Amino acid sequence: MHPWAWGAWLAGALVALSVTRNPLYLLLIWLCLLLVAQAWRTAGPGDASAAAGRLRPISPFKFALLVIGLAALFNAFTSHVGQTRLFTIPGRLPLFSGPVTLEGVVYGAINGLALAGMFAAFALLNQVLPVQSLVRMIPRTYYPVAVIASIAVTYVPTTLRQFQQVREAQAVRGHRLRGLRDWLPLLVPLLVSGLEHALQLAEAMTARGFASQPTQPGTARRAWLSPRLAILPGMLLLMGGWLLDLTGYGGPLGGVLAAGGAALVLGGLWAMGRSMPRSSYRRWRWSAWDSLACFGVLLVLAAYLQPAAQDGLWYSPYPALALPPFNPWLGVATLGLLAPAILTFLPWLRQADPV
Amino acid sequence: MRARLLDITILLVSTLSGLLALLYPFFLPALAGQAAPGRMRLGEMPGLMTALVGLCLLVLLAEAQGQGMQTKLVALLGVLVAINSVLRFVETALPGPGGFTPVFFLIILTGYVFGGRVGFLMGALTMLVSALVTGGVGPWLPAQMFTAGWVGLSTPLARQLTKAAAPALGRHAEIATLAVFSVGWGFLYGALMNLWEWPFIIGPEAQSWSAGLGFWPTLQRYAVFYLATSLAWDLAAALGNLLLVLAFGAPVLRALRRFRQRFTFVYQAVAN
């Protein structure tokens, strides 16, 4: 699937998770996330390349369970509101003393469910997209930043290997890690050899013409300078408009100024990007798969952002637990998030997939 | 000269704007007291703050990378960011006590030796790349990039402090200044990162942000929130930074300075 289609899918999932606290819809969104993760783990064409070079310190779904549990516990022990009392913490402990209620546990778990859903959606994006695609999604304006990020991503496995080599070499000499100072014979050689690599890399890049001077330096300088002349007043307008809007003086003027300022800043950044040359070995292609995934996202956004749905999306377990409302149409629309999972089962679409 | 002035002005305006947007929970009530009735849309403020600070990060990043970065600087930053990302991965896989993290040590020292611009890029890109390689990309990433970038951007201040402390502390002035600086950032990083999420968190009333309160009650609530949730965590971060600077500061500074000299040569075309 196209990386920008994944970006749209992520935006849809985040909006849906942000605007609802109804546990039934949250669970439905979670179900979609799990099914998409499962489908792409077993059938996703991009998975093998995505996994390459990615380090995983903790499983994102185990992490999500931890977040839900902690949020439920934290709210239950610090918020003493609700009618179904589970037990009481005695004494005068600030924050903690008082009744622990079932409503407190549920409220915390619902907030944890929404927060963990956001973590899981991002984790899924990290799982299905290769690091190279994420780096390539950095806008053209930030070309040097993208180059630095590419070098760093490439050098992380090298640095890990180098760290292992330094450690083995020091161990052969009888070095043992007993205290903080014992890390010095590992850290300094790692840093020095890394900087030596940087020098060699810089020479190789220069030899291949990276950052060479343009044939008409004056033109390049103007192309760089003029957008920045728009960014400065843009920032001032944006902040001035925002402050005016905060104070409420000037009517709609504040909002207009802030929007104009933001447009100037974004326009300036876009114009800066135009002076940055960028080429790619293989172009991404937009396929029918991507359009269908975006249609699913549009369905979710239309359902969750319509004013009529807002009351049913909100739910509070206080003062006493009650069943949350459920609109079947909204439930069906939520399944739009399943588009990437459904599409993995359609072979004629998978053939068109560029990743 | 004019281009340099423009650089500094954009850096200052975007930094101050970001700070102002971040601190809105404290001054919003004061402004709200003067506001015309019905004009305030307090519910929109957290989202607006995120958008504003995100925009400031974009401007700062574009400004810090400058026009046509030198090859040597690109390579240097790429490798240093890789080393720091490995340190962050080690910290994620084998968590230290509380908020202890080794990444700020190298950000502070790199900014101190190579300047604030390089420090900003080192901070912001360490967070970006370590998130990419550990699968940690999330809504918190712009906040981490911005705040870690500020850590690096502020390091030229430590040079001024070293100069001021030199007559009293002699050759120990540099490490002493960097130690104080890193302890300060240990707490400040946590306090600033909290501000990103504090207005969104629904918790006990005495710790939660509420739109209609005055400046002092808001500050009081934030102080309670910070003491209850973050102080012990940030104390471990600050002590970790202190230990790292005291144990490794001098040799790492020597290595970075040696390479700064080697990185400053300029390629010149041979005239035909």
Image: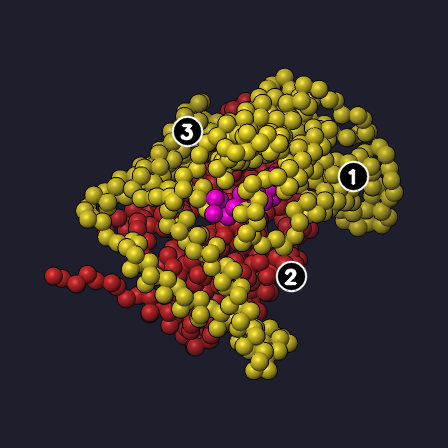
Residue farthest to the bottom?
A173
The quadrant where residue A175 appears? bottom right
Q: Which residues are magenta?
A: A121-134
Q: Nearer the viewer, mark 1 or mark 2?
A: 2
Give the SS element for disc 3.
Answer: helix
Residue farthest to the top?
A308
The structure's colour scheme is by chain
Q: Amino acid at mark 3?
A: Ala
Asked whether residue B12 is in view, the answer is no
| Residues at circles 1 and 2 in contact by the CB criterion of under 8 Å | no
Q: Amino acid at mark 1?
A: Val
Q: Chain of mark 1?
A: A
Q: Which mark is residue B94?
A: 2
Q: Colour of chain B?
A: red
Q: Which mark is residue A259?
A: 3
Chain rendered yellow:
A
